[in-house]
Amino acid sequence: MRFHTREPAVRLAKWYHVTVSKSITIRFDPEVAALVDARARKSGVSFNQAVQDAVVRAEAADQDSVSDIAERHIATYRTVLDRLA
């Protein structure tokens, strides 16, 4: 008879994937690496932090553009949406 269950391991795995940050390896062309390095030095942050900041800015810009597109479509099709409501 087995007394141990997988349940604690499953809970541990879920905790790990929720709380532990993700790590990746990125290979930059020398030109791009130089641009990121220059931005990092200008901002007074590490190279890694400059890359993270760029990813966050890109994601925020993408979310803004999705919102803008949705608002334009709502404005364009306002009469149809009003008739359907």
Image: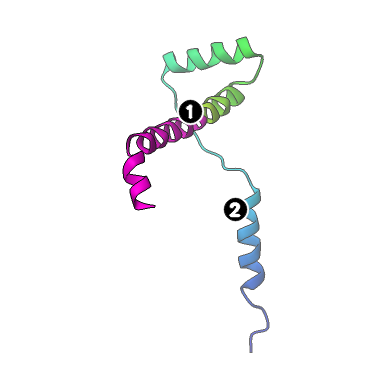
Q: Nearer the viewer, mark 2 or mark 1?
A: 1
**Residue drawn at 40 percent across, 37 percent down:** 70
Which amino acid lies under the numbered mark 1 shown in the image of this protein? Answer: Ala
Count numbered badges in the picture.
2
Task: Tell me how the rendering is colored.
Answer: rainbow
**Residue drawn at 52 percent across, 38 percent down:** 24
Residue 22 in the image: state x and y as whole percent.
57, 43
Element assignment for label 1? helix
Front position in the image: 50 or 84:
84
User: Would residue 23 appear left or right of 80 to someone viewing this image?
Assistant: right
Element assignment for label 2? helix
Q: Which residues are magenta?
A: 59-85
Q: Earlier in the sequence, mark 2 or mark 1?
A: 2
Question: Looking at the magenta stretch, what is its main secondary structure?
Answer: helix
Residue matched to label 2: 17
Residue 42, picture quadrant: top right
Say whether residue 8 is magenta. Answer: no
**Residue drawn at 39 percent across, 52 percent down:** 85
Residue 1 in the image: state x and y as whole percent.
64, 90
Front position in the image: 81 or 71:
81
Front position in the image: 67 or 44:
67
Which amino acid lies under the numbered mark 2 shown in the image of this protein? Answer: His
Residue 53, placed above or below residue 23: above
Spatial CA span between label 2 and label 1? 26 Å
Say whether residue 76 is magenta. Answer: yes
Residue 59 in the image: state x and y as whole percent.
49, 32
Q: Residues within 10 Å of mark 2 (few under 14, many from 20)?
A: few
**Residue drawn at 57 percent across, 29 percent down:** 52
User: Would residue 71 appear left or right of 46 to someone viewing this image?
Assistant: left
Residue 19 in the image: state x and y as whole percent.
66, 49
Residue matched to label 1: 61
Q: Residues within 10 Å of mark 1 (few under 14, many from 20)?
A: few
